[in-house]
Image (cartoon, coloured by chain):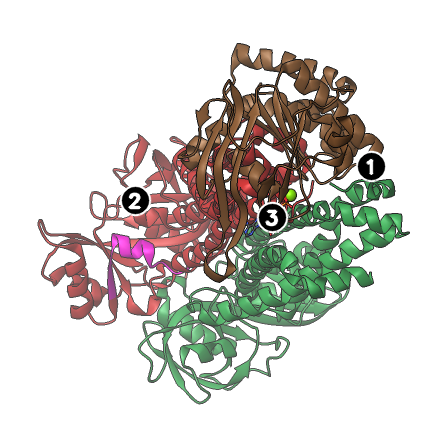
Chain colours: A red, B brown, C green
Amino acid sequence: MYLALKEMRRARVRFGLLAGAVGLLVYLILFQQAISTGLIDQFIGALKNQSADVLVYNAQARRNLEGSIVLPEQSAAIAEVEGVAVAAPLGEGTFTVVAGDPDADEQDAVIFGYQLGGPGEPTTLTAGRLPERTGEAVASSRNAADGFDVGDTVTVVPNAGGTATSFTVVGLAEEINYSVAPTLFTDFVGYDAARRAVNPDATDVLPSVVAVHVAEGADPAEVAEAITAAVDGTEALTRQQAVDESPGVSAVRQSFSVILLLFYLVAPLVTGLFFLIVTFQKAGALTLLRAIGAPAGLLVRSLVVQVAAVVVSGAAVAVGLFWLTTRTVIGSISVPFDLGAIGFTVGLVLVLALVTSLAAIRRVLRIEPIAATTGAGVHL
Amino acid sequence: MTTPPADTVADTAPAAGPAALELADVRKVYGAGDTEIVAVDHATLRVGDGEIVALLGPSGSGKTTLLSIAGGLLSATQGRVVVGGEDITGHSAAELTDFRRSKVGFVFQSVNLVPFLTAEENLLVVSELSGARGGARKQAKARAKELLGELGLAHRAGNLPAQLSGGERQRVAIGRALFNGPALVLFDEPTSALDTKIGEQVMELIQAEMRSRHTAAVIVTHDTRMTHYADRTVRIVDGVLGAEPVEGDLAAH
Amino acid sequence: MGLATTELRRRPGRFAVATVVLTFFSLLLLLLGGLLDGLFLGSTGAIRAQDADVIVYSSTARDSFLRSRLGSDVRAEVEAVPGVADVGGLGFTLLGATVPGENELADVAVAGYELPPTGVPEPPPAGHAWADRRLEDAGVSIGDTLLVGPSATPIVVDGWVEDTNYLQQGALWTTLDTWRTVQNANRPDAFVPDGVVQVLVVRGDGDLAASIDAATGSTSTLSVDDAVYALPGVASQQSTFNAIIFATLAVVLAVVALFFSLLTLERTGLYGVLKAIGASTARLFGGVVLQAVVVALVAFVAGGLLAWAADAALPGGIPLQLTVSRYVFTFVALIAAAVLGSAVSLRRVTRIDPASAIGSAA
Ligand SMILES: Nc1ncnc2c1ncn2[C@@H]1O[C@H](COP(=O)(O)OP(=O)(O)O)[C@@H](O)[C@H]1O
Ligand SMILES: [Mg+2]
């Protein structure tokens, strides 16, 4: 401890730079992890936290809700597939709305229309109740303050020739956003009205997907396969598949995992190499200490203390910065301050830093106290 | 200045009475087979309590090797090594580490100080290595201050080695070697990097410190001008300890 | 300086650590930048390509193409605004398309247009399209008939255009009528009557946006640049990625400073001697900077090659796009970080006392 701390005090700039670099790297890791999960949750939370076991898309839609419509004959055929208990329409669209105060600015909102009591209803209600009749809606709790709180009225702004249609928020549910917009779940009739408000020329409002409850005991994955096979031009996905295979989600996930992997490599690499160089540079002092009776274990412990001190102080800076970040909203993504994830990241970086410091530790262990008598290759 | 005692012959047989160092028939062989080098051969040496012995020999004669064996830095190939009553002949590496920390003091030829520690801290590191805490730590601090004062370095206590002159550095090293109160201090050419005048001052200081503490010392040198600071001079040539007296000692007769 | 380069040549190992670490960072910067560029370019090509001054949306659309609807009445009002030279309709539909001989559907954006965007010829005949070359990756070839959307509306590919994609989907440039046919066959819920378009692209002079919005009272007009950033996600993507890239550059700065201060520390004695024999601080420091720049250069080349290899190895779902300007940016940023980072050593080099060379054998 004594040696480790004294040395760090005498070389503040160097250790400070290292801790700063590690801190920023840990911060970047935390930040990117948070936005990738935040982004994914806020892109497809609505799919994750609704009750349908299986969602049936139009095959042409490439698993994109926005691009999917299910034709009436397909809907009818889906209901007939073995293992399907309930099949009901689920519509999705992005609309321009005025929420809360009627004089408020217009904003975007996503509206899901489902069959009340059927598959596709939100599962994470935190306030109020689920809609019971046309004109009622559950809103994403994240946007309560933006005019989507219980009791607020949300009005869809019509296009020329259309009629305005309104919803009263009767409940809030957690993590039900879609496409990072405020999100409402209402009944399909209300959704139909919203569609026609902006497309007065619409001939027919079709469901975006068909939401399915599977029969008791049936395996959603098997039912999904059966639907895809039985109904031409459809692709049925389990809830989890719909989440994981949403367009963009897997690309975002893969992109971030490549970047995060590099960050996770670089932070310990910088630490390990720094300590390796420093250990080489002070080989003379270490040899002397061994010669005057310092056990090798003590010198190794000193090194480990320094690695830990650097990572922990860097991580403290990182967590502080990250906490400040979570107070603000990045673009339209809010970043969660998740202590578990932070602890995991800091722990992982610490372990990796210790692993990369093994080279330096090996160097310490290889020091021969006898070399103090020759001073070979050693300088003050 | 102390006059060397009359008996300047290296005793080949350990005498009776307390001894700071006893080497009995010590042999050190480096390498094996064709490349085998006998660095020290059948060396027997006894250094009495409080005695200062100069070990004189040309470069490559085995002085450092002998010193390293005496200090537990190196194990002898053969023979017995007893320091301050502790037989270290069969000690393991860990036991030797403990031994070096508590029983002997070293002043090496080149690197003697930890560059990132101040003069005072370079002394304190000895007690820190022994795990001093609380009260012991306070005591150690007081002792370090006192010792640095004695060595004429009170005003340099807070300086890093790089800020000290060569003579000052060597004095700090002496303080470090004395800090654990050893029965035996081993000096490997302590003045080789210093000019003559500073070298003599350092030797005087060594002599005075050893005398005042009644601490035994072995001082390795290849410089005959330094031997008169010792009670006795032992010669070494090609790893063999010699009994012939040196010129300076003859003159004293 | 001669000394600095000689040291680089004779003792490359001494610089290996800094080079390896910086190589990782240059790879990281290129991948981050490449991802940003891929997301940006792939989302915005169709808009950036517009050879126009402003884009007119219906005011209820909140600057969204897909939700905007403008009829012929509004178009007439816009055409009458003083300063307006040319007006063209534009509309997009995002769909999947069946490619002959391929199992996987291709993501397409069917675009109906009148005024040709940069690099796009005059509108092809009805039922035909100019395809973005990105669709080549999905197996499309010239002459193919793509079956677009659930209703399998056929579109024949007549030729390639470049960098015109819309929201990561490969653009198919068709006449407005063909676009309406596709939209109405496949999205009956978003029916577009004859004469209606999503937006109008306008060429002309003067403060077009203000005068058009004043004249119609029902439109929201943006410059083409603003329209690019009004696309969903584009602005926040840019700011988030740029924040990450610049924070990474700050780390690079710290890392260069760190490793070069270690190198300088190692050379304290040498510098003392060199100063004693007459080398100036400026000369010695210049050598440190030069070495940092060379290390950054080598790291950039190595990182660039790795990024190029990563681009080839990564699965197609990742929208990585390595552009020349991204390479240039990364190069300049790394060199700047090397120069600034090595400046930390200036203090140490300055402080070295030539007198220390004398009488310090230890
Ligand atoms: N580690 C070693 N391996 C092989 N030979 C050594 C080693 N150390 C010392 N020697 C040899 O042992 C002999 C004595 O060396 P040393 O004790 O260092 O002499 P001195 O200190 O008197 O100059 C020399 O010939 C030297 O080359
Ligand atoms: Mg020697």
Q: Is residue C182 above or below residue A215?
A: below
Q: Residue A5 falls in which quadrant of the image?
A: top right
Task: Check disc 2 and report its element: helix, strand or loop.
Answer: loop
Residue B209, image x and y in percent?
69, 19
Instruction: Count residues near mark 2 (Cα–Cα under 10 Å), then give few for <14, some for 14-19, many for 20+.
Output: many
Q: Is residue C272 magenta?
A: no
Calculate the distance from the C-alpha at mark 2 to the C-alpha at mark 3: 87 Å
Give the residue type at disc 3: Asp
Calculate the distance from the C-alpha at mark 1 to the C-alpha at mark 3: 27 Å
Q: Which of marks 2 and 1 is in front?
A: 1
- Find disc 2 in the rendering and name its residue: A49
Residue C316, image x and y in percent?
43, 69
- Find disc 3 in the rendering and name its residue: B238
Task: Check disc 3 and report its element: helix, strand or loop.
Answer: loop
User: Which image quadrant: the C terminus of chain B?
Assistant: top right
Chain letter behind tag 1:
B
- Find disc 1 in the rendering and name its residue: B195
Numbered tag placed on residue A167 in the rendering: none
Q: What stretch is highlighted in magenta?
A: A235-248
